Image (cartoon, rainbow, N blue to C red):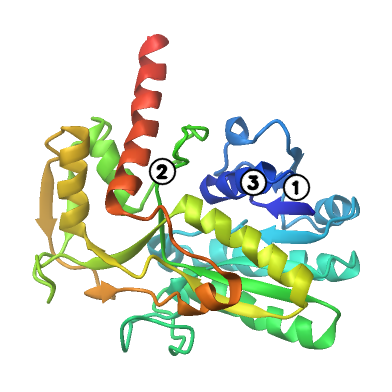
Amino acid sequence: MKVLLFGGAGYIGTHVALAFLERNDTVGIFDNLSSGLRSNVDERCRFIEGDILNKDQVKAALSEGWDAVVHLAAFKAAGESMLKPFKYSENNITGSLNLITECVRAKVKNFILSSSAAVYGEPSYLPVDESHPTNPTNYYGYTKLCIEENLKWYSKLKDFNFVSLRYFNAAGYDGDGRMLGLEMNPANLIPVVMEVAAGLRPNLLVFGDDYDTPDGTGVRDYVHVTDLAKGHLLAADYLLKNHQNLIVNLGSESGLSVQQIIDTAREITGKGIDVQYVERRPGDPAKLIASSTKAKKELGWVAEHSSVESIIASTWKVYQANQKKSAMFK
């Protein structure tokens, strides 16, 4: 299979590329390197530097002939999306429409979207399945839902099929240490915890410790990035075999509280990890847990690596490697 990953130099994209490479597929990566890392791009990949806002660059990349496209080229910070909606509308909506349109023109019929549980908004029941109402509470989630709706229309009107993978909280790193580039300016809990453990920031802010949960902190569904990567392989195979659309959740189906993450990180890293408990953030639900039954049934996908210990240990290994590398050059 020949697969082109847009945004493939990013945290999730490089793990997806590795998964395709491991089964000897031909992999291309198209990225503007605004947040992705060239150093994390495997030398076996065809690398194309470009931007999805540039139609000519997208068209040229797609002209090389690909069996499937994976779209990971989106900004993803929910909080930032509420402050900078123009940034998110331009890249996540306009850029995505450019990409979808050029895929149709290039007769690339199989499209995999990196979507998000943010499309659901405040959960009205748990676990959240794909029948749950979609009512995003942040602009980032809206941009993902908007692209899903456009994919449905394009599929009706053109010879074109898609799988939308609604990720829950991506976490962890390749267990064999083959991905060592850290995310730039991380906003998610686990990398922030790691930065505190590594001495890169003084403390961790925990937003709310009075939720209706066992320890008072918010509960989320964390899924290991290696498991997410496997989901993309299965999605590509599904499209080539079935020529049908599919929307599925990818989550571990188990909830981890913020406090559980902190306690496990303290145990694995041996670091104290200073914490400050502050007021809740508006719109943060007490719990958000996935149902991945549909992904299991339709794709045969299971979350094999998504234990809290595996997630924290694989992430800490990368932070330690970067600390050692930095010490060598001092």
* Label 2 close to label 3 by CB (< 8 Å): no
User: Could you say whether the residue bearing mark 2 is in a helix, strand or loop?
Assistant: loop
In the rendered structure, which disc, 2 or 3, sits on the residue that comes first in sequence? 3
Please state if 81 lies on the left or on the right of 66 as rendered: left
**Camera-side residue of 330 and 3:** 3
Residue 234 rendering spot, x and y as whole percentages: 63, 63
Residue 241: quadrant of the picture? bottom right
Per the model, the C-alpha gap separating discs 1 and 3 is 9 Å
Residue for point 45% across, 65% down: 81
Amino acid beneath label 1: Asp
Q: Residue under label 1, please give it.
A: 25
Amino acid beneath label 2: Asn
Q: Quadrant of the N terminus?
A: bottom right
As drawn, 154 above or below 133: above
Residue 328 rendering spot, x and y as whole percentages: 40, 10
Amino acid beneath label 3: Ala
Residue 245 rendering spot, x and y as whole percentages: 69, 80
**Camera-side residue of 143 and 183:** 183
* Disc assigned to residue 17: 3
Residue 53: quadrant of the picture? bottom right
Residue 55 rendering spot, x and y as whole percentages: 81, 58
Per the model, the C-alpha gap separating discs 2 and 1 is 32 Å
Residue 243: quadrant of the picture? bottom right
Q: Residue under label 2, please give it.
A: 185
* Disc assigned to residue 154: none
Residue for point 41% across, 52% down: 305
In the rendered structure, which disc, 1 or 3, sits on the residue that comes first in sequence? 3
Per the model, the C-alpha gap separating discs 2 and 3 is 22 Å
Residue 90 visible, this orientation? no
User: Could you say whether the residue bearing mark 3 is in a helix, strand or loop?
Assistant: helix
